[in-house]
Image (spheres, rainbow, N blue to C red):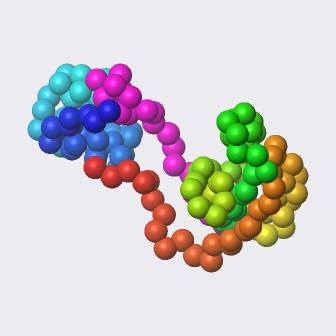
Amino acid sequence: MDIDLDPIDRKILAELTTNARISTAELARKVGLSKTPVAHRIRQMEEMGLITGYRAMLSPLRLGLSHVTYVEVSLDDTRENALQRFNAAIRGIPEVEECYMIAGGCDYLVKIRSKDVGDFRRIMAEKISVLPHINNTSSHVSMEAVVEQNPVTI
């Protein structure tokens, strides 16, 4: 479903993406409207599912989570029931920052954030390798984040 956004909606989204804590009054000033129409536009974008929530962005580095590993996961069964079981199980692992079902040499690509290689090894042994239908995994350790940002820009 394509959503038709006018330039003011785009400005509102750009401002909220930068600072979700901005007051409605300040946001209205920045986009050139009064508070009521801005609040109405925000409410409409929330109701249509364009704005899905607001959250605090935490610094993984300040939390001691500097180790990033991408894990290729291949399953022994890719029928729908097996995929659903794997999906449900991996959603319950807090160290999994992202997980994508992909086409290619493996079935899933998983981003895991941990304290260090020892912590990663524990996560793999206790949480990842015991997931349903795991056939094999291949890990790729990140050496440096070259680009790391909110994936959606307006």
Q: Which residue sits furthest bottom?
A: 143
| Magenta-colored segment: predominant secondary structure | loop
Q: Is residue 102 magenta?
A: no
Left of 151 or right of it: where is 58? Answer: right
Q: Which residues are magenta?
A: 44-66
- Locate residue 35, reporting x and y percent: 20, 27
- Can the viewer see residue 125 in this picture? yes
Q: Is residue 49 magenta?
A: yes
Of the pair 19 and 154, the residue shown nearer to us: 154
Of the pair 16 and 103, the residue shown nearer to us: 103
- Can the viewer see residue 97 in this picture? no
- Locate residue 111, reporting x and y percent: 64, 58
Left of 116 or right of it: where is 41? Answer: left
When asked about the image quadrant of residue 22, the answer is: top left
**Residue at 24 percent of width and 22 percent of height:** 40
- Locate residue 149, reporting x and y percent: 45, 59
**Residue at 28 percent of width and 49 percent of height:** 154
- Locate residue 55, reporting x and y percent: 50, 39
When asked about the image quadrant of residue 25, the answer is: top left
